[in-house]
Every structure is written in C-alpha cells, then in structure tokens.
Amino acid sequence: MNFAIVIPAYNETLTIVDVVTRALQQTQKVIVVDDGSTDDTLRKLDGLGAQVIPHSQNMGKAQSLWDGMQAALSLGVDAVITLDGDGQHCPEDIPRFLESAKANPQNIIIGARLADKSEIPAKRYYANKVANFWIAWAAGYPITDSQSGFRLYPSALLRQLIISTARDKSFVFESEVIIKAAQLGFKSNALKIAAIYNENARPSHFRSVMDIVLITRMVAWSLFTRGMYLPGLYRSTIKPKLFPKPFTAIGWDGVLTLFLSTIIIGVTAGVSYILTLLYAISFAKKSTITAQGSHHLLVLGMQLQNNEPNEYYKSRLDRAAACMHEDPSLVTILLGGITANANISEAQAGKQYLLNAGINESNIRIEDNSRHTLENLKQARDLLQLEDGKVTIISNRFHLARVHSLANGFKITHRLCAAEEYLPINEVTLLRLLIEAFEIHWYYAGKAFAHLTRNKYMLNRIT
C-alpha cells in the first residue's frame, strides 16, 4: 500500500528526532508539521530526511493535521497515517495498520490504547471513556478509543472530507473526523496498541476537562441538528449489549429495567439517584478493614490486565492476605471466571497472587464460572452454606454498597471489609461512585419490577 506518515509537532524537542527517524524506516514519505514551536524542534528536523511544513505561529493540532494530510494527498498516496511527535506511538506498529487496512479498505484504523488501562493516567483514561460514549452515539457504532492520534485514514475519505480546522478545534478535530466519516460511509476499526507515557516527554497538550467539554459541545450540536440521532444511540450502546457474541450481556429484562430505572430518575428529578449515591458514599466511608470472627472471606474478582490482577483487584487480594496472615484459619474463596481477553480466570490469577504473598494453598478455594458481581455472589451462595453469618466479603470501597445490596438479595448473611484503608478523594473515585450508584438504582428498580410482575425468571437471577 502506498502511504505517507504525517506527524504534527509542537515543542517536541525531547522526542522528535527519535520519532521521525523510526518513521523514516517505514517509508520515506514522512511529513512533519511544526506548529510554531518555541523550542528547537524545527532545528532538530534539519537533515533528517522528512518533509517539513513550518507554521510561523501556533495554529493548533487540527490545522497541523490538515496541512500534513493535504501534502500527503498531493503525493498520490492511498492512505495517510498520523502519529504524535511525543513518543507515545510506535512507528514499528505501522505494518499492522497496513494489514488491517487491507482487510478493511473503507475504514479508519485507530490505534486503541484503552485496553491497557494500567499504563494510562486515570484522569486521561476516564476522560477518554466519556468522549467515547458521545462520539460513538454521534457516529452510530461502538468506538474503543476515540482520542488516539495514531490512525490510518483512507485517502478516499480525506478527499471528501469538509471540516473546520479552527484554532479551538485542536483536539476536537480527530473526534469530529470520526463522526463526519461515518456520515460519508467510513467507519473505524480498533487496533490494539501499547499505551506509552515516557517520563522524559513534555506534558500533554490535551486538557482533560476543557477539551472533553469542547468535544462534548461539538457532539451535542451534531446530535441536536439530527434530532438527537436516536438510531445512533441504539447502534452504539444498546444493540451491542442486546446482541453480543455470544448473546448474554444484560438481556431483554436488563434493557427493560434499565429503561425503567432511567424513567424513575427522570420522574423524581434525580432525587432517587442522589439518595442512591449517598447510600453508596455511606458504605464507602464507614466500612471496616477487618474480618474478625469470620470463617470465610469472599474476594470478588475483577477484569485482568495481561492475565494479571489490576490495581483494584490487587488491593482486594492484599486485604485478604493481611486478614489471613492475622488469622491463619481463614479460608478465602476467590470469585471470577474468564472475562475480556484473558487466558485464565480472575480467580486463578488471584490464587497465584495470594500464593506469591505466602498464603497456604489449602486455605484458598476458587470459583471460576462467574463473570460479574451478581454472578459472583450467586455462585458463592450456591458454593457454601453461609447462613452462619461468618462470612466477610472483600471489595473496594466504591463497590461495597452494591455488594451489600446484591448479597442481601441472595440472603447471604455477611460482613463487609474494605480493600483500602480509607476512601480516596479524587476524580476517579467520584466517577466510580457515580457509576455504582446508577448500578444500584438499576438493581432496585429491576428487583421491584420483578416482584410486582412476579417474573420468576428475573427473580431467579437476582434472589
């Protein structure tokens, strides 16, 4: 495939030489747009062999990308690959982009980083997730990483594209491209790439709050001018849950009760949700960190990263290990099957972690069929006779209120033990609590509906 590489650069003195040198190993058609850098980025580009387009003043990433794309199109290429100049992207991944483009010639190929959550700053990760939701709605299909700048664009798309490159569109541009591309019949494919945040790189130009606000404003206007584009909401969020492969997810009853829960929040002007949020915060703040008097610990699993426990799951396991060191008679039951792209179950990964922490294998049991909290607790109830009340459930503080609600639904007499010493006060915790509160509200709305309608199938799932 005949392609060119476009690299927008603004004050990239620490990384630009390495990025351009490696890009030139993939193709000699490398175009760097220096966006009015105030350091010596432009000087360092001398003699490297790349085509350099200098801006006399900073015009923003949107204009830099557009100028580079137009220069690439003038070379008669079939595709334009963009990557950032700060070293976050590996030019060595480009052959993988080309292979994906051969299989999907009408699609934008986007290097998706969000699968590697542990390597991404939390504020950036959750800001991207918010942006993904809105952009997917406006585009009309699920999107894994809408903010990645490592992309392959078909030239056929770029020749048709009409889009603003104003200064305030700097980080809106790449999001808007996805939406406008969908309207032209070009979707995107995600290609998993590593999340690289070099210690020597300059601070990101992306402003997590302000730029997400600008992106959301752009998307809101796009939706408003199309009557909120409800088919897009259905195709991007509801349809993937209704018809996953295999068909499991939340099912029709889950969709119905989700709708009911949302209606209740609207009818009560948000009061029912606020009360649920306060309920979640109360448990998050007051729960203890001991398991005194218990016979069993239940440790809820969590999605793995590279077949290893993530930071939240590790904190649960660390708390379990501390309790077991304090009381060697305790038996820990690890809950969680194979989820996402893992090759082993959450419970198996947790067991290995506890063994490495010096816990006796005879004190560890696993349940590796469940896929989420509801199934975790249902499997735990069926696994043991827990009526003696000597069971302590360990989870993260933001999760404890939902755990308590579900465990009560299954009539599991239990105590709660928080993974963390105290409730962290930060944006990530707040977002987690907001999500948990919605999940709890959804659960109680569904439970009430199941009892009122005497729906045995639903009641069997949640009680």
Image (cartoon, rainbow, N blue to C red):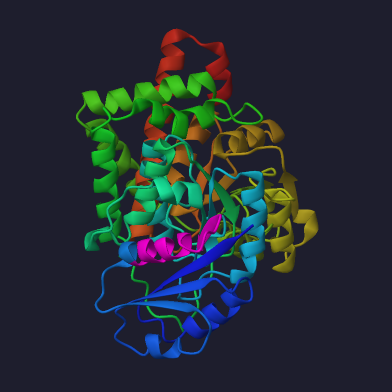
Quarter of the figure with residue 381 = top right
Quarter of the figure with residue 39 = bottom left
At a point 54% along the width and 65% down the height, the residue shown is 4
172 or 264, nearer to the observer: 172
* Residue 338: percent from left, percent from top: 69, 44
The answer to whether residue 72 is visible is: yes
At a point 39% along the width and 86% down the height, the residue shown is 41
* Residue 367: percent from left, percent from top: 72, 42
Task: Please say if 133 is above or below 381.
Answer: below
24 or 243, nearer to the observer: 24
Task: Please say if 325 is above or below 362.
Answer: below
At a point 54% along the width and 36% down the height, the residue shown is 413
* Residue 347: percent from left, percent from top: 69, 49
Taking the magenta stretch, the answer to whether it contains residue 70 is: yes
* Residue 290: percent from left, percent from top: 52, 57
The answer to whether residue 149 is visible is: no
Which range of residues does the magenta coloring cover? 64-81
Farthest left residue?
269
Classify residue 332 as left or right of residue 279: right
367 or 409, nearer to the observer: 367
Taking the magenta stretch, the answer to whether it contains residue 288 is: no
375 or 85, nearer to the observer: 85
Q: Quadrant of the N terminus?
A: bottom right
